[in-house]
Image (spheres, grey):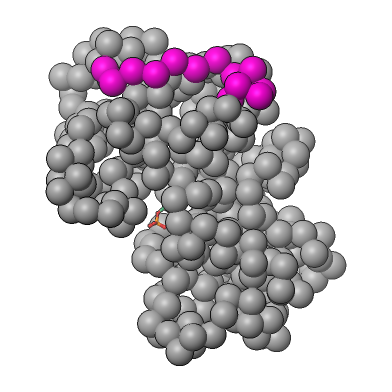
Amino acid sequence: MRSLIDILDFSAEEINELIDNANDMIAHPERYSEVCKGKKIATLFFEPSTRTRLSFEAAMLELGGSVIGFSEAQSSSASKGESVSDTAKVISCYADIIAMRHPREGAPLVAANAASIPVINAGDGGHNHPTQTLADLLTISREKGRLTDLTIGFCGDLKFGRTVHSLISALSRYTGIRVILISPEELALPSYIKRDVMEKNGMSYTQTTDLEAVMPELDVLYMTRVQKERFFNEEDYLRLKDSYILTNQKLKNAKSDLCIMHPLPRVNEISVAIDEDPRACYFKQVLNGKHVRKALIVKLLKEAGTI
Ligand code: CP
């Protein structure tokens, strides 16, 4: 049974096809309005979410299907001690596809191994968030017209930011990508990603703490929130949380066609004044997330022989 647990579960060709299909769904939504008629998605969210859960649900509704699920572990039998494997087996009796978010790294993989329906990783701890990556790739491709030959700055919490980990993995497949890692020392990208993803694939990267110094070089700036929920003590979080706040002043030497991204939620990392700047793409990312999740649901249900 095909699932999506890690973005590298899909080949570059499959990701490009998903982007093409999402673009077709944007252009011709009416052609897809009954593709999943009679089918159900179960959104199993053991951790809070606004965008990912509701975009999966909106996506399935727009495809003519329906939605079941829960939005917190406390309202499920996980609170009584039920395992992820048993939960996945049970939900396989009720739904056609699962989107699961869990605070524990690897939980969606455990679910996929137990389920008899496709499982989508909707974010597992500080590990991966492959469907955010699909939204990010669709956004970069629509805004820049390509996924190659780009200088991309990742700024903020690169240690715990699962969206960064998944997007860097995906970008390692494309040529001419230069990554600039911008973070405090304590929130640097984990060395296993530098070694096993970037160095292994010959990806060019540099590291700095100075956002303004590298701003003129960037085609894409990917801001991130400091992940409060992953910190072991509040004192460290409070010290690091406002390390980078993007303001109009900091953008003064940026390219005129810079694409400013953020997976959201935003806390304080981007001044709201920037929302009016045509280079701000983070709310477009939100909408693209729904479209590409539609394409993903259709792909996995077709491969499962469900539609
Ligand atoms: N980007 C993202 O995963 O947002 P949510 O936590 O609101 O789903």
277 shown above or below 100? above
Nearer to us in this view, 194 or 64: 194
Nearer to us in this view, 222 or 238: 238
Residue 24 appears in view:
no
Q: Give residue 54's position: percent from left, percent from top.
A: 45, 65
Q: Is residue 204 magenta?
A: yes
Q: Give residue 225's position: percent from left, percent from top.
A: 30, 43
Q: Quadrant of ligand 1?
A: bottom left
Residue 228 appears in view:
yes
| Quarter containing the N terminus | bottom right
Write the residue at 57% across / 80% down: 83
Which of the 4 image quadrants contains residue 23? top right
Which of the 4 image quadrants contains residue 75? bottom left
Q: Is residue 68 magenta?
A: no
Q: Give residue 108's position: percent from left, percent from top.
A: 59, 63
Number of marks in the rendered image: 0
| Quarter containing the C terminus | bottom right
Nearer to us in this view, 98 or 159: 159
Q: Give residue 222's position: percent from left, percent from top.
A: 39, 31
Nearer to us in this view, 69 or 38: 69
Write the residue at 64% across / 61% down: 109
What are the residue bounds of the magenta stretch? Answer: 198-210
276 shown above or below 151? below
Write the residue at 33% across / 18% down: 208
Write the residue at 64% across / 55% down: 5
226 shown above or below 303? above
